Amino acid sequence: QWVKLLSKEYPTVAFHASMQHPYGKASLLSLLQQFKFIHKDKKQISVGIIGYPNVGKSSLINTMKKKKVCKVAPIAGETKVWQYITLFKSIFLIDCPGVVYPE
């Protein structure tokens, strides 16, 4: 249901980060390729993977790359600095530390 709701305003893909059984990987790759095509005038695009701590940001990138390029841990705080990961020649993913918004 949340995919349907979010899709009304944003490009939305359901995704399961798993090296053995990923779900939504092809859809996300397609979305990134379309975004690159729309922005042909840009030499490269960088996509920030942001969110709350320990929700799978690094795992998403590892799944997209089909190998462990970002460290993951069962506790929050493993990612301490931004990491730029080359997905394709002109598409970069940025693994960011978790963000906790003030109340």
Image: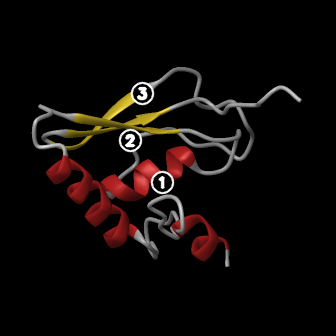
Q: Secondary structure at mark 2?
A: loop
Q: Give the farthest residue toward the top.
A: 81
**Mark 1–mark 3 distance (CA, rounded to whole Å):** 13 Å
Residue kind at label 3, given as amino acid type:
Gln
| 61 is higher (above) or lower (below) than 8 | above
Which of the marked residues, 2 or 3, is nearer the chain's N terminus?
Answer: 2
Q: Which mark is residue 83?
A: 3
Relative horizontal placement of residue 80, taking residue 103 as reference (left or right): left
Nearest to the eye among marks 2 and 3: give it: 3
- Could you say where residue 96 lies in the image, as x and y percent from the top left? 53, 31
| 11 is higher (above) or lower (below) than 26 | above
Question: Around disc 2, counting alpha carbons within 10 Å, would you say few (fewer than 14), some (14 to 19), or many (20 or more)?
Answer: some
- Could you say where residue 52 lies in the image, as x and y percent from the top left? 70, 41
Q: Residue at x 15, y 39 (%)?
A: 90
Disc 1 marks which residue? 60
Q: Secondary structure at mark 1?
A: helix
Q: Residue at x 60, y 51 (%)?
A: 56
Residue kind at label 1, given as amino acid type:
Leu
**Mark 2–mark 1 distance (CA, rounded to whole Å):** 11 Å
- Could you say where residue 35 lies in the image, as x and y percent from the top left? 26, 52
Q: Nearer the viewer, residue 15 or 68?
A: 15
Which of the marked residues, 2 or 1, is nearer the chain's N terminus?
Answer: 1
- Could you say where residue 34 lies in the image, as x and y percent from the top left? 22, 59
Q: Residue at x 18, y 34 (%)?
A: 44
**Mark 2–mark 3 distance (CA, rounded to whole Å):** 10 Å
